[in-house]
Image (cartoon, rainbow, N blue to C red):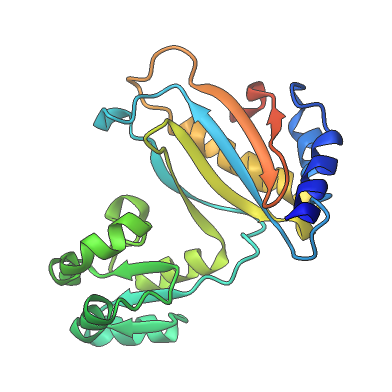
Amino acid sequence: MGRDGKRFKAATQAIAPEKIHSLNEAMAIAAKGSGVKFDETVDLAVVLGVDPRHADQNVRGTVALPHGTGRTVRVVVFAKGEKAKEAEQAGADVVGDEDLITKIKDENWLEFDKAIATPDMMRSVGKIAKILGPRGMMPNPKVGTVTNDVAKAIGELKAGQVEFRVDKAGVVHVGIGKVSFGAEKLIENAQTVLFALDRAKPASAKGLYVKNVAVSSTMGPGIKVDPAETKAA
């Protein structure tokens, strides 16, 4: 614990806590990591001026990161017949129908990151909604994971598509890559997410939409980013 504390303190001292950085400056700092021996994930946190209690201000969507996430995404597909074969050919890690649902329900099997379902399977998948929902794994047509085009959905998830969703506190957290990506790729990934959030601004949102932005590596401190850099061209 002592070593981690000293490392975090040293990383914190390398930045001015109250300084607002440009996106380029912030990513240059984040890309240095915090001195740990593993490849840290870089996280983007955005505080939005919305009230998630209102359905029309529940900001949510998906975006494909140009350089991926740096993670291997394990995808399961709930499908039958030809769609199941299509999913297997497209590279799904696990494909099943009622048998897969039973395995998740009875054995609490959750060795995957994302789930896709064909529309005809959703009534059955609803049986495990209480298991998948809280973990952010429940297929949803709004983010393209309930679809008959399973090959496309698998390809997008494997290539680095990420989902963003505002939490109860009005904050969106998105992993935008690894420290090893370097500043340039992290900047491009961050811009892609920020511009997607800008385009997703609810019509009912009043006042300042993007209040605060920060980036951080897994074990590093938060680095404040100028909110003015969040608007799409």
Instruction: Kindly tell me whether residue 48 is visible in this rendering.
Output: yes
Residue that extends furthest to the left in the rendered view of this protein: 123
Residue found at x 47% / y 81%: 91
Whether 213 is drawn above or below 41: the answer is: above
For the image shown, how many numbered marks are present on the structure? 0
Instruction: Kindly tell me whether residue 183 is visible in this rendering.
Output: no
Nearest the viewer among 2 and 139 is 2
Q: Is residue 137 left or right of 10 when viewed as pictured?
A: left
User: Based on the displayed image, in which of its 4 quarters is residue 221 positioned?
Assistant: top right
The quadrant of the image that shows the C terminus is: top right
Measuring from the top left, give residue 96's x and y in whole percent.
Answer: 28, 84
Residue that extends furthest to the front in the rendered view of this protein: 2
The quadrant of the image that shows the N terminus is: bottom right
Measuring from the top left, give residue 75's x and y in whole percent.
Answer: 43, 73
Residue found at x 15% / y 68%: 127
User: Based on the displayed image, in which of its 4 quarters is residue 169 positioned?
Assistant: top left
Whether 205 is drawn above or below 26: the answer is: above
Residue found at x 69% / y 29%: 225
Nearest the viewer among 128 and 59 is 128
Nearest the viewer among 116 and 74 is 74
Residue that extends furthest to the top in the rendered view of this protein: 207
Residue found at x 18% / y 72%: 121
Measuring from the top left, give residue 156's x and y in whole percent.
Answer: 49, 64
User: Based on the displayed image, in which of its 4 quarters is residue 54 positioned?
Assistant: top left
Q: Is residue 142 left or right of 23 when viewed as pictured?
A: left
Q: Is residue 102 left or right of 233 when viewed as pictured?
A: left
Measuring from the top left, give residue 172's x and y in whole percent.
Answer: 49, 38
